[in-house]
Amino acid sequence: MTAPAPAQRRRWLLLGASLLLAACAQPARTLPQGDDTWRGRLALQVEDSSAQSFSAAFELQGDASRGALTLFNPLGNVLARLTWQPGLAILNDGKAEHRSASLAALTRELTGSELPVAAWFEWLHGRETQTTGWHVDLSALASGRIVAIRLQPLPRAVLRIVLEPSP
């Protein structure tokens, strides 16, 4: 058996590299277009002795009364999907479906801390709506950045949202 020629070997290496890159590509995410759809990244840092942190890519749709929040890992796979409507919130973490009348309780179950998801919609529209225990900084919203700090209840938590530019 003869060794492959250098040109043939390069083609095989190029093909292998192309296949590896294709395997790492994130699947395309399609969302209905509209004013009430956002995507980006979020990070939550809880400042306690355990130094909890949570980060994920996200897609957020709807409004404070009805909506969906989908979280993705760095490879683009769904970590969890949270949906809500009046009187019912559902968290699907890929293993089980959890139901509650409280959206805040399900965000605590998902991230380890209650998140003011209902207030996010106000913040995303540029309104500095106050939420109990949270202080929001919208000064960088024009560049797609929001920082919210939970002062009460302790421990303090910092939520950072970075939006993707609209297509």
Image (cartoon, grey):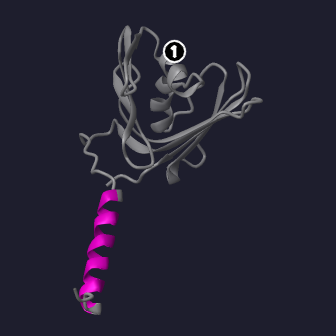
Q: Position of residue 119 (x, y in %)?
A: 51, 26
Check disc 1 and report its element: helix, strand or loop: helix
- Residue 22 magenta-drawn? yes
Q: Is residue 101 shown above or below 119? A: above
Q: Nearer the viewer, residue 72 or 65?
A: 72
Look at 48% across and 18% down and name the residue there: 106
Q: Is residue 19 shown above or below 163? A: below
Q: Position of residue 38 (x, y in %)?
A: 38, 41
Q: Is residue 158 left or right of residue 16?
A: right
Let me know if residue 137 appears in the view.
no
Dividing the picture into quadrants, the one containing residue 7 is: bottom left
Look at 74% across and 21% down and name the residue there: 154
Q: Amino acid at mark 1?
A: Ala
Q: Nearer the viewer, residue 155 or 95?
A: 95
Let me know if residue 8 appears in the view.
yes
Q: Quadrant of the C terminus?
A: bottom left
Callout 1: 10 Å neighbours few (<14), some, many (20+)?
Answer: some
Magenta segment:
7-23
Which secondary structure is most common in the magenta stretch? Answer: helix
Dividing the picture into quadrants, the one containing residue 39 is: top left
Q: Which residue is farthest front?
A: 1
- Residue 148 magenta-drawn? no
Q: What residue would you read off at disc 1?
A: 105
Q: Is residue 103 left or right of residue 95?
A: right
Q: Position of residue 161 (x, y in %)?
A: 53, 42
Look at 58% across and 49% down and name the residue there: 140
Q: Is residue 81 left or right of residue 155?
A: left
Q: Quadrant of the N terminus?
A: bottom left
Q: Nearer the viewer, residue 115 or 100?
A: 100
Q: Which residue is farthest right?
A: 49
